[in-house]
Image (cartoon, helix red, strand yellow):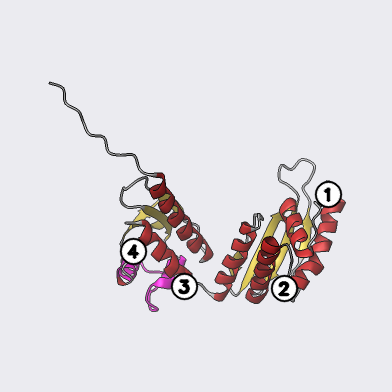
Amino acid sequence: MSSTRSVPPAPSSSSRDVRSAAGRALVEALRSSGTHPILRVAPGGESPAVTVTIPAHGSPHLLLAPANTDSLLPVESLAVALHRVLERHEIRAHVRTVVAVEPALELALETAGDAERLAALIGGHLTEAQAAARQLRTACSQAGITAGDVRAVEDRIEIGALDAEDAGRLCRLLGREGEELCLDSREAVDALADRLLPLLEQATGGFIDAMADSACSTCSRPDRIILGHATPAQARRLADTIRTAHTTGEAP
């Protein structure tokens, strides 16, 4: 007599999409607060849905801990403190310590909703500079500009390096220019940096440096433009200008 074994249904694409979106939101919130998490998203209905691993000491998750939490506490004590904060905000997660190159905390969030709530909680605790950097990075991404170096450094925003093609797109957006820029020479990259200087000042109301960083003949990396520091107000104005130019074709 033959028997058949039931096979669990394959996870739906919508379930995977929801978990992946929640994971991305949490990673972006953590990156905005100054850390670089490692993300794992479970397929289907498995639990935990989303797991992130973050450095233990000096991590932005300490923003969520009580004001008297000492960042130099043993990592096990930091894990306990963070777990209590998550419980207080009704975020279901298991926090444990892991040791690889350095001590770290692993946060295993039960559902995509728990990951989304933690992302929102972290986002609500960002400093002004961190929030402005996040706004600028998001605006660049939506406009097709890769600006992975944008980050908060104390009370200012470091914009960092853009590949020349991305810097050219930024230039076209800020200058409301439709034509592609020819960037086939060192002189053209230098000219792009010079062109960006007044456009950045016009967009932000203040000076932001732009310096050409052409690749050498044997380098594998592309030509780049290095952008300087901005205040939170400048970063917000630049983000608004990029967003408006991208969506309407006109810079404010």
Q: CA distance from mark 1 to mark 4?
A: 53 Å
Looking at the rendering, the stretch of residues picked out in magenta corresponds to: 59-87
Q: Disc 4 marks which residue?
A: 79
Q: Is residue 40 visible?
A: yes
Q: Disc 2 marks which residue?
A: 204
| Amino acid tagged 1 | Cys
Where is residue 200 drawn, in percent x and y? Answer: 76, 68
The residue under the point 21% across, 31% down is 5
Where is residue 9 drawn, in percent x and y? Answer: 30, 39
Please state which of residues 216 and 94 is positioned toward the viewer in this rendering.
94
Among the two numbered marks 1 and 2 on one chain, the one whose residue lies closer to the N terminus: 1
Among the two numbered marks 2 and 4 on one chain, the one whose residue lies closer to the N terminus: 4
Please state which of residues 105 and 166 is positioned toward the viewer in this rendering.
166
The residue under the point 79% across, 64% down is 175
Q: Disc 3 marks which residue?
A: 124
Dot 4 falls on a residue whose secondary structure is helix
Dot 3 falls on a residue whose secondary structure is loop
Would you say the magenta stretch is mainly helix, strand or loop? helix
Residue 85 included in the magenta stretch of the image: yes
Q: How many marks?
A: 4
Q: CA distance from mark 2 to mark 4?
A: 41 Å
Report which quarter residue 121 is drawn in. bottom left
Residue that lies at the very extreme toward the right in this rendered image: 187
Q: Tell me the tag on residue 182.
A: 1
Label 3 CA crowd tier, 10 Å (few <14, some 14–19, many 20+):
few
Label 2 CA crowd tier, 10 Å (few <14, some 14–19, many 20+):
many
Residue that lies at the very extreme toward the bottom in this rendered image: 67
Residue 160 included in the magenta stretch of the image: no
Among the two numbered marks 4 and 3 on one chain, the one whose residue lies closer to the N terminus: 4
